[in-house]
Image: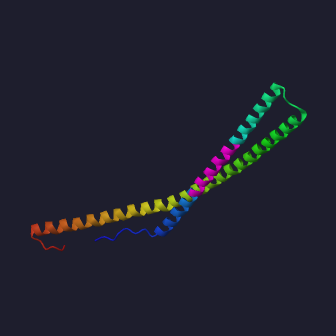
Amino acid sequence: MAKAFRFRFEGLLRIRSRAEEAAERNYLAASAREREADKAVEAARQDRRQAASEALARRQAGTLDLRAVQDEGAWERSLDLRILDAEKVLSDACRGTAQARETWLAARRAREIVSRLKDKQHLGWLQDLEHAERVLLDELATQAHARREGRPESL
């Protein structure tokens, strides 16, 4: 009976697999933060467009006074600042996502290296097993042939 295949670096493979899974989870979380930041930017831009549209409608209606124009300008500036803040958050989120992706890919490559080593060693073990089986079958065939010929079993 042949020995079962045992990969000497199985512990390392498990550690690298866990590290890859953790890096993937971090990447997915970073991607979710990026999507949320993108939605916030779009919402801020939509609010700005709506404020501009409402201001234009009031101007066309001719119901503006100086105080309303000043308030409107302050409101539009605050919306512009909100857009800039949201874009900065989005930019940071994009950088975080890119960094998390690189970390995940590096962890994946590290795991794949050990996984390929395991595959190669398993293939070598199978080949050795197959070779030992062929040698045993050849020996059995030689002994059977010797018995049929009436010669002693051992040569």
Q: Which residue is at the front of the view, 25 or 51?
A: 51
**Residue 9 seen anywhere in this rendered image of the structure:** no
Q: Relative to 64, is 135 above or below? A: below
Residue 23 pos. (x, y %): 58, 58
Q: Which residue is at the front of the view, 149 or 119?
A: 119
Q: Residue at x 34, y 65 (%)?
A: 128
Q: How many marks?
A: 0
Q: Which residue is at the front of the view, 138 or 119?
A: 119
Most extreme residue toward the front is 63
Q: Main structural element of the magenta stretch: helix, strand or loop? A: helix
Lateral position of residue 35 relative to residue 113, left or right: right
Residue 81 image-quadrant placement: top right
Magenta span: 25-41
**Residue 136 seen anywhere in this rendered image of the structure:** yes
Q: Residue at x 32, y 65 (%)?
A: 129
Q: Quadrant of the N terminus?
A: bottom left
Q: Residue at x 40, y 69 (%)?
A: 6
Q: Which residue is at the front of the view, 39 or 88?
A: 39
Most extreme residue toward the right is 66
